[in-house]
Image (cartoon, rainbow, N blue to C red):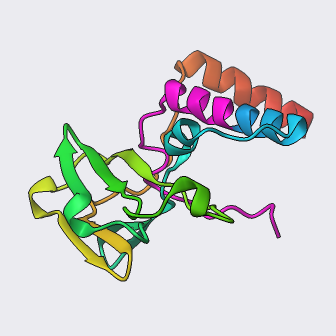
Amino acid sequence: MRSLIRWDPFRSIAKWDPFEELRLMQHEMDRLFNRVLGSELTAVQQKAMWMPSVESYTKDGQLVFKAELSGVDPKDLDVSINNRELVIKGERKQETGTKEESYSYQEITYGSFERRFVLPEGVKTDELKATFNNGILEVRVPAPAISKARKIEIETPTEERTVISAESKKAA
């Protein structure tokens, strides 16, 4: 059932970044042209393309981010907060000692990456905790309380209310 989409209260709060949309569109267009034209990607292009997969959800009153970082040394990771923005930077380094011509098949992408996520207002950033286990970086921060939706009464002048109610009685 692809028509059902899980509601994410923090996605609506997150700041929309039009430049990120343009980068994603450029990346997809590059992939399309490379597939159609059959061109090989250079090592520089491959390094620029690598972005670790990330998921975000709320659990037990906490906002959780998980990043898949297999092959990344925890010493090469940097997790920071900058103006309500969670920044995850790192680098997957290639093994030294293996020559380029020695490869018969190479699909793993190496290089640096940086991912940024806008946190909702009210997040206690001083309570942020990060753990790294089995190639998964997990960042947890207490989620702020979300106010429930409520209906707002629309006020109209009294003359209009009497006209509207009189017209609705005539229609009935």
Residue at the extreme left: 126
Q: Residue at x 27, y 75 (%)?
A: 132
Residue ID at (42%, 42%)? 14
**Residue lying at the far bottom of the rendered structure:** 134
- Along the horizontal axis of the image, is 13 left or right of 162? left
The quadrant the N terminus occupies is bottom right
171 left or right, relative to 79: right
The one nearer the camera, 14 or 162, is 14
Quadrant assignment, res 126: bottom left
How many marks the image carries: the answer is: 0
Say whether residue 75 is visible: yes
Which contiguous range is marked in magenta?
1-27
Quadrant location of the C terminus? top right
Q: Can you give x and y, in whole percent of width and height, for residue 33 in the image?
A: 81, 33
Q: Can residue 155 be seen in this view?
A: no
Q: Does the magenta stretch mainly form a helix, a strand or a loop?
A: loop
Locate residue 161, reporting x and y percent: 62, 25
Position of 107 with respect to 130 (left or right) is right
Q: In this view, does 63 lie above or below 117?
A: below
Give the residue displayed 37% in from the left and 83% down from the top: 134
Q: Is residue 21 above or below residue 141?
A: above
**94 within the magenta span:** no
Residue 22 is covered by the magenta coloring: yes
Q: Is residue 9 left or right of residue 167?
A: left
Near-viewer residue (134 or 60): 134
| x 41%, y 57%: residue | 148
Residue 139: give x, y in percent of width and height. Answer: 28, 66
- In terms of image quadrants, where is residue 106? bottom right
